[in-house]
Image (tube, rainbow, N blue to C red):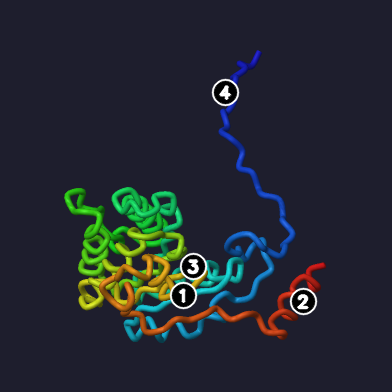
Amino acid sequence: SPTTVEVPRLRTGPQTMIPPTVRKHFNIAGPCMADIHYMLPPERRLSELESLIESRQYFVLHAPRQTGKTTGMLALCHRLNAEGKYAALYVNVETAQPAGSDVAVAMPSILHALRWEADRLLRPDMQPPSPDPSLPPADVLKAVLSAWAGNCPCPTVLFIDEIDALRDDTLLSVLRQLRSGYVDRPHGFPLSVCLIGLRDIRDYKVRIRPDSESLGTASPFNVITESLMLRNFGADEVAELYLQHTAET
């Protein structure tokens, strides 16, 4: 009789799960994602920013929560990187808020957030270096940003979100290190920096210290040239957004 050959059964790994189709919805929690949220082109309300970047400006963008700041800045950051003209890095510094005014505790958290986002957004030759542990907290952020701008093959742009989550000496330290490096741009410091928050950071010059104490300057960040407030949607844009839902349903 013919010989029976037993073919070994192939062992298969975990099956790739195909995510179910998700109906889009209106987002009121965190940045929008085009595949699951109804949304308009996020850079539409940020048309002024690119000219400020090209002009090597440092500026502020502020607006209330859930108005599209982070969504817009991330979209702009991704586009700038895709075009290859700049190395654009977005970082959220809210994780340093629990440190309060303790700069020695807050600064490592800020630098870790910077490193995390750089790994996600930039290719290796465009990423900032690791911080020098021998440097004091009051200088280490400036040193990292300076080395980043000096070694990167294209001009660097930095978006710092939740800047007003920082408090007291921590906020002052970050702002002063940015201001100190401002004169070295674009080859020795980021070409352009945008500070993003709920309020205009210039309003904090009174809140950071009592009136009886001096900051030693009119403002801790007096190199900014523009303070922009993210505009609301117009009536036509609201209609456009709702019509996305109408068309789908």
Residue in front for this viewpoint, 110 or 200: 200
The residue identified by callout 2 is 243
Disc with the residue nearer the chain's start (2 vs 4): 4
Secondary structure beneath dot 3 equals helix
Residue in front for this viewpoint, 240 or 180: 180
Disc with the residue nearer the chain's start (1 vs 2): 1
Q: CA distance from mark 3 to mark 4?
A: 50 Å
Instruction: Indicate which disc residue 74 carries.
Output: 3
Disc with the residue nearer the chain's start (1 vs 4): 4
x then y, percent, for residue 23:
74, 59
Give the residue furthest to the front.
212
Q: What is the quadrant of residue 164 in the picture?
A: bottom left
Looking at the rendering, in which quadrant would you find the N terminus? Answer: top right
* Disc nearest the viewer among 2 and 4: 2
x then y, percent, for residue 213:
31, 68
Circles 3 and 4: CB distance less than 8 Å?
no
